[in-house]
Amino acid sequence: MKNQITVALLIGVLLIGFFFSFPQIPVYADTDVYTVSDPRTDVERLGVNPAPNNCGPIACSSRFIGEVTGASSSLNGQSINKITITLEKATDGQTLSGTLYFGVWDPASGAPTTANALYSFGSRSANTIADGPTQYSFTSIGSPYTITSNDAIGVFYDGALTTESGIFVSGRSVQFDGTNTFSDCYVNAQTNQANSQCFSFATCGQSATWCSDTTYDTIMIMTITLSQEECVINPETVFCRLGGGTDDVTGLGGLVGDSVVTLGCNVIFVDCSEDTNPATNGLGLLIFIASIFVVIGMFYWSMGTRAFEMPFFIWVVIILSLSAFFTIIGLIDPVFLIISIIAIVALCAPKILSTVRGTTFGGGSTE
């Protein structure tokens, strides 16, 4: 019975080791580079009106609404791969056609289309937009986009407004970066007024064109979502192996990972405040030493004093295996594997020399 339990415990140890060695389940942290939030002070209508595109009761319509970066924008050089924007149906309960596309466009390329987008965060059916102001988030599955001067970041709508009222995009009087980053629209052509408008800027003219309002910002969040930095630097740490690490990072094994490291750091008196890597802060070495005693205890519990009668080479294999295992999973530095090999060779040297001498100089029979 004891032998069966010992085998089960050894299998359990191997399974735990496999879990530590298995590739890390991605853990992500968000960093917002642009944030303008409620309360809003105006809305702009989103949609594509066919000619003559007469302006409605609340502003004229634009097929693109978002933010544009000036030459001195603080967003220039920043990377983003996620956008969150506040939208609502202009007329509650109305069925809308068309699709909303969220991305980055270059105003110098002319009218925005799905084909000339510089970057895409995602898309959504216009009819799924709620009646009241609601935040919608879209994250690109590709590489992040690095913002440059004169980038228009926001939402493009291809839905016709012949009988539909379109989508409202919320704006707020200048809240971000002064006049270096500001609201931008691609307004539709219209004939019943002298000018189209973009938020409060009401002199965009009658032609379809890009038009900016430097006194307004679009209510929106631009975000860079990346793997948690500490796990990028030290992916072999217990934190990252188990999906934990910091209070603002979540993972499948976050609670377990934090508990393991907290216990090791507090009970074993290892300084983890300056170094969270168990391979260099000593925690991994202590776990390695403890594992040796655990294995010895398992054999003793199963076999009694006979465990110490096992051939010496078996203990050599056990210690080398443990050392190699903890080196592979990143809990101890490879130098300890080398030291283990050297120490074991030194301990075995007398036996090896004795065997060699006996083989080389032993007498033979004269009969």
Image: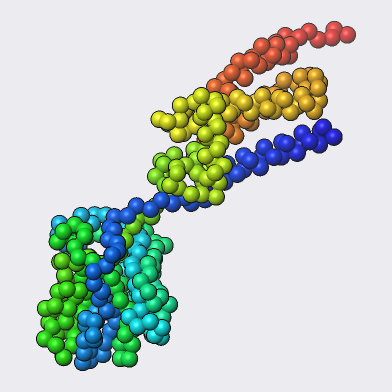
Instruction: Compare residues 308 and 337 and report the one nearer the observer.
Output: 308
Which residue corresponds to the image point at 21% horizontal and 90% vertical from the top-left?
54
Image coordinates for residue 246, horizontal then vertical, percent:
45, 42
Q: Quadrant of residue 260?
A: top right
Q: Point out the residue furthest to the right here.
A: 367
Which residue corresponds to the image point at 72% horizontal and 14% vertical from the top-left?
355
Q: Is residue 215 above or below residue 356?
A: below
Q: Is residue 189 visible?
A: yes
User: In which quadrant will I find the N terminus?
Assistant: top right
Image coordinates for residue 174, horizontal then vertical, percent:
19, 63
User: In which quadrant will I find the C terminus?
Assistant: top right
Image coordinates for residue 38, horizontal then vertical, percent:
30, 64
Instruction: Compare residues 323 and 101 and report the one nearer the observer.
Output: 101
Left or right: 270, with 295 as reference point: left
Instruction: Compare residues 317 and 295 and report the one nearer the observer.
Output: 295
Q: Is residue 10 above or below residue 350?
A: below
Instruction: Compare residues 4 and 59 and report the one nearer the observer.
Output: 59
Which residue corresponds to the image point at 30% horizontal and 91% vertical from the top-left?
162
Image coordinates for residue 99, horizontal then vertical, percent:
37, 79
Left or right: 227, with 318 as reference point: left
Q: Is residue 159 above or below residue 219?
A: below
Q: Is residue 113 visible?
A: no
Q: Quadrant of residue 19?
A: top right
Which residue corresponds to the image point at 72% horizontal and 9% vertical from the top-left?
361
Q: Quadrant of residue 229?
A: top left
